[in-house]
Structures are given as C-alpha cells and as structure tokens.
Image: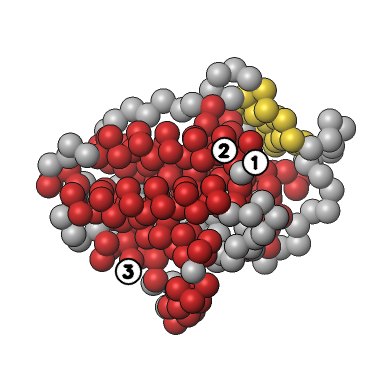
C-alpha cells in the first residue's frame, strides 16, 4: 500500500467514525428527520453510504457481484440509488449502523490490499484504490453534511477536505462532459484556502482560467451542497466561470444543485 492511499484511508476512517458517533445515539424520531436531499431522511443517507461502500467492495473483490449490480443499474438507471437507500433506511437503526460499519471496514481492508497498478470498475471511469478511497471520502463527507444539517449539528471543516478539493479539480473535464459540453483543453489554475489557513494549488501559475477562494466553499460546490451564488469563490475567465456553474465531482447524472439563498 502506498503512502497516499494510507493517508486517504486514515482520513476516510476518521470521517466515518465522526458521522457514526453523531448518529449512534439518535432516537427513532431523529432517524426520520428530513435532510436537504429531497425524500431522504437521516436513515436514508446512512443506508446510501452503506450501499455504496458495499458496491465499491464488490468492484474491488467480486467481479460476478459487480456485474450483477451493473445490470441492476442499467435496468433502472434513475431509480436504483433511491431504491437502495430507501429500502436500506427502513431497517432498525442498530441493524443499519452495523451494516454500514461492516461495509466500510471491509472496503478499507480490500483497498489496502488492492494492487497499486490495478484499476477496478465503477459507475464512472475505472479507479485505482487511491481514487476509490478518495471518492468514498467525498461521499462520506458530503452525505455526512446532509445528516449534520438535519440534526442541526455544527460540523467544523478540517483539512481532510483536501481529498474532496482534489477530486473536484480532477473531475473538471467530467463536469463539462456530463452536461454535454466540450471540456476546455487548457489547464486551469486553482488556488484554495484550507480550513487551517494553508494554500492549496493546482495547475500552472500563468493559466488564463483561474478559480480561487475558500476550499470549504469549493468542496460544497463540487458536491452540489451549495449554490454558486452563495460561495466566496472567484472565477477569472469564461471557462472557469462556466465550470463553477456545473461543477460535479461524483459519478452519475448531473444533479439540479441547490437553490441560492434569498
């Protein structure tokens, strides 16, 4: 296992542990609190994380099981995710938490043992173990935000969100393609201020297309947890401005995003 993967897995475990601690003591009514995702309550969000961790485990270890899941998704591309989350969230909370804990622990072990030079299939492009761990961190963090929002619990950002920011930068071309647009060929410069105050940068210093601002805002935007107008992000250049309108770091169809605050 390489050092980068080890670091991502450690941060993924920390983010998952924090979310599990936040929901472990909830009563039955709190599990049913609505989250910002329409039709999804707290239990649905956790069930989605469990299902996706299980899907990633199949991708990493069981080709037959993965192929069966792909056929299921092909048969119902717009409903398979909701169906799995809603069905999974209907079980008793203790059972749901045990399922998620088992899935994320097993996935971490599988990614730890996965050959560095071998990619695994996914709903988007094939992924290395490091890329899969990064994607799992992004989902855990983003859906965790939905849960914290529903519970009215403050969740202070940490520099662990660098994984989300990196994924957001790396998926710039995908964000254009999923909207049926040609991705700009030139590199962008991205300069983000981390929660700790550190500056994170990607791309050439002399790039004409530039994005800068708080890393937290950028991470919220690329996971579609905030409207572009409600961020402090600055775009220089028309392509950079367009990117911030359509940014998406997760596989699947483009979401409708969040509405701007009044």
User: Residue 117: where, in percent of width, then height?
Assistant: 70, 55
Residue 19: quarter of image: top left
Mark 2, Cα crowd under 10 Å, few <14 / some 14-19 / many 20+, is some
Disc 1 versus disc 3: nearer the observer: 1
- Name the quadrant of the C terminus: top left
User: Residue 79: where, in percent of width, then height?
Assistant: 39, 72
In the image, what residue occupies the spot 53% across and 61% down?
A: 60
The residue under label 1 is: 2
In the image, what residue occupies the spot 41% across and 60% down?
A: 54
The residue under label 2 is: 6
Question: Can residue 5 be seen here?
Answer: yes
Q: CA distance from mark 2 to mark 1?
A: 6 Å
Give the vertical position of 65 relative to 92 (above or below).
Answer: below
Q: CA distance from mark 2 to mark 3?
A: 33 Å
Q: Report the front residue among 67 and 181.
A: 67
Q: CA distance from mark 1 to mark 3?
A: 36 Å
Q: What secondary structure is found at the residue carrying circle 3?
A: helix
Q: Earlier in the sequence, mark 2 or mark 3?
A: 2
The residue under label 3 is: 83
In the image, what residue occupies the spot 29% across and 30% down?
A: 153
Q: What secondary structure is found at the residue carrying circle 2?
A: helix
In the image, what residue occupies the spot 53% across and 34% down?
A: 161
Q: From the viewer's perspective, is 194 left or right of 93?
A: right
Q: What secondary structure is found at the residue carrying circle 1?
A: loop
């Amino acid at each position: 296992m390489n050092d980068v993967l080890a670091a991502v897995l450690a941060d993924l475990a920390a983010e998952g542990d924090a979310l599990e601690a936040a929901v472990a003591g909830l009563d039955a009514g709190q599990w049913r609190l609505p989250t910002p995702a329409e039709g999804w309550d707290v239990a649905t969000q956790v069930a989605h994380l469990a299902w996706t961790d299980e899907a990633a485990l199949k991708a990493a270890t069981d080709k037959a099981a993965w192929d069966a899941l792909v056929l299921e998704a092909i048969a119902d591309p717009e409903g398979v995710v909701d169906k799995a989350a809603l069905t999974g969230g209907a079980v008793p909370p203790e059972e749901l938490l045990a399922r998620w804990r088992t899935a994320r622990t097993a996935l971490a072990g599988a990614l730890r043992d996965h050959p560095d030079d071998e990619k695994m299939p996914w709903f988007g492009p094939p992924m290395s173990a490091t890329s899969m761990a990064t994607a799992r961190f992004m989902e855990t963090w983003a859906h965790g935000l939905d849960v914290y929002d529903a519970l009215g619990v403050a969740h202070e950002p940490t520099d662990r969100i660098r994984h989300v920011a990196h994924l957001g930068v790396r998926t710039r071309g995908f964000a254009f393609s999923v909207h049926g647009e040609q991705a700009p060929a030139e590199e962008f410069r991205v300069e983000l201020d981390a929660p700790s105050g550190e500056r994170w940068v990607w791309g050439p210093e002399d790039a004409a297309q530039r994005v800068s601002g708080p890393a937290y805002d950028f991470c919220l935007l690329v996971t579609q947890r905030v409207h572009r107008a409600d961020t402090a992000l600055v775009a220089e250049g028309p392509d950079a401005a367009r990117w911030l309108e359509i940014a998406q770091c997760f596989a699947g169809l483009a979401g409708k995003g969040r509405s701007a605050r009044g």
